Image (cartoon, rainbow, N blue to C red):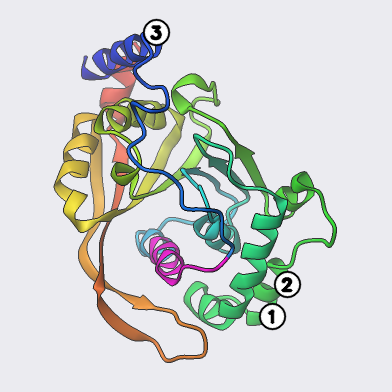
Amino acid sequence: MDRRRDRIRCWVVRLFGGTRHGSDTVGHCLPPSAEIDERTLEQGLRQVEMLRQSGRVLEGGTLLDLGTCWQPTIPLVFFLAGCDDLVLVDRERVLDAELLTQTAMNLRSFSAEIAQRLGLEERDVRQKLRPPENATFFGVLRHFKMQYLAPCDLLETNLPIGSVDLVTSRAMLHRYSERYVKALLPVVADLLKPDGLMCHCIDQTDRLEYIRLLKGASFEIKIEEFNPILRVVPEDSDLVDDPSLLNSFLVAAPSRADQSAARH
């Protein structure tokens, strides 16, 4: 019943313009930059590690990344981890061939750390992160097994139901209004396969609010790491623990009983 009310609310918002830009966006992408943000790289590696520790096999999976924005670091990490189809979604078009190519090339500087964390050979990491020279944007995306949907609002896009294995997001409440995230979560639940999972990296200050929204959309929290100390991955330096990089990581799944009832 709650799911049906959420769907009705989504349609009302769409009909009367409540989810257009300016009302559902509370933050903006930083100016495009291919420079690797070490914190983002660490977050991507940690999400892969959490999912693997839960027993999830990433190889061959389909990933939906919500709000890729200015740097596709986390999708590239999941590509290296074996995901076979990565769907990147942005409300505004930010990514292009140069930005994606240069980000991948810059990640090669971290190949040793990435290889160690993902259980890969360093030479394979470096090779996979080198896209074809002079390729079109479509060619670069194809090399990394990606699709880029932008500008795209998932509330208004008919992606196939039950087509996604994993959904990733990063700091959604810093970029989108609570109302928009609340409307989006039931849509994401429908896109997930029966054993699909969402993996979120959120600021610790948003943890309780995000859990409330997930439970309101009939998601179950499967794994949580509250305020883990993330390892920084600076180039040519030893790993250190930096207590300033505090985040919460959540892995959640839709309640299939609620989802089945909503569809009927």
Q: Quadrant of the C terminus?
A: top left
Instruction: Check residue 127 in the rendering and tell me which mark sits there, or answer none.
Output: 2
**Left or right: 200 in relation to 211:** right
Q: Amino acid at mark 1?
A: Arg
User: Mostly what secondary structure, the magenta segment?
Assistant: helix
Give the number of the mark in front: 2 or 3: 3
Q: Which quadrant of the view contains residue 253? A: top left
Q: Between marks 2 and 1, how big is the CA–CA gap?
A: 6 Å
Residue at position x 38%, y 28% in the image: 22
Determine the secondary structure under disc 3: helix
Q: Which quadrant of the view contains residue 133? A: bottom right
Number of marks in picture:
3
Magenta-span inclusion, residue 169: no
164 shown above or below 37: above
Determine the secondary structure under disc 2: helix
Q: Amino acid at mark 3?
A: Leu
Q: Between marks 1 and 3, how big is the CA–CA gap?
A: 52 Å
Residue at position x 26%, y 27% in the image: 179
Earlier-in-chain disc, 2 versus 3 = 3
**Left or right: 13 in relation to 112:** left
Q: What is the crowding at mark 3: few (fewer than 14 residues within 10 Å), some, or many (at least 20)?
A: few
Instruction: Check residue 123 in the rendering and tell me which mark sits there, or answer none.
Output: 1
**Left or right: 2 in relation to 41:** left
Instruction: Check residue 176 in the rendering and tell me which mark sits there, or answer none.
Output: none
Magenta-span inclusion, residue 38: yes
Q: What is the crowding at mark 2: few (fewer than 14 residues within 10 Å), some, or many (at least 20)?
A: few
Instruction: Tell whether label 1 touches label 2 (CB within 8 Å).
Output: yes
Q: Amino acid at mark 2?
A: Gln
Residue 60 locus on image (x, y percent): 60, 51
**Left or right: 171 in relation to 100:** left
Instruction: Check residue 15 in the rendering and tell me which mark sits there, or answer none.
Output: 3
